[in-house]
Image (cartoon, grey):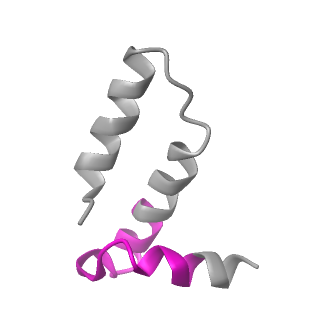
Amino acid sequence: MFTEAALASLVTASLDQGVNVEVLRPVLDIVRRQIAAGYGRQGTARIVEELRRVR
């Protein structure tokens, strides 16, 4: 299961290596919103629920 810290580290490492984070940044934003909404323990599967809501 990805955590916010792990995903943030992945974004940072990618930027440090010159890797495009165009896809990772929005995922990190979703994870942070889910944590703020109280869904932090539900894991990455909860991202799908956020994507359905945004439609």
Q: Is residue 21 above or below residue 29?
A: above
Q: Is residue 48 above or below residue 35?
A: below
Residue 21: x %, y % from top left: 54, 34
Indicate whether residue 33 is drawn in magenta: yes
Q: Main secondary structure of the magenta part?
A: helix
Residue 32: x %, y % from top left: 41, 61
Indicate whether residue 3 is drawn in magenta: no
Quarter of the image with the N terminus is bottom left
Residue at 48% from the left image edge and 73% from the top image edge: 47
Highlighted magenta segment, given as a residue range: 32-50
Q: Quadrant of residue 54?
A: bottom right
Q: Is residue 24 above or below residue 3?
A: above
Q: Report whether 7 appears left or right of 46.
A: left
Residue at 23% from the left image edge and 79% from the top image edge: 41
Please state which of residues 15 and 33 is positioned toward the viewer in this rendering. Answer: 15
Q: Report whether 45 appears left or right of 48.
A: left
Quarter of the image with the C terminus is bottom right
Q: Quadrant of residue 34?
A: bottom left
Residue at 50% from the left image edge and 23% from the top image edge: 19
Q: Report whether 11 appears left or right of 3.
A: right
Residue at 29% from the left image edge and 55% from the top image edge: 4
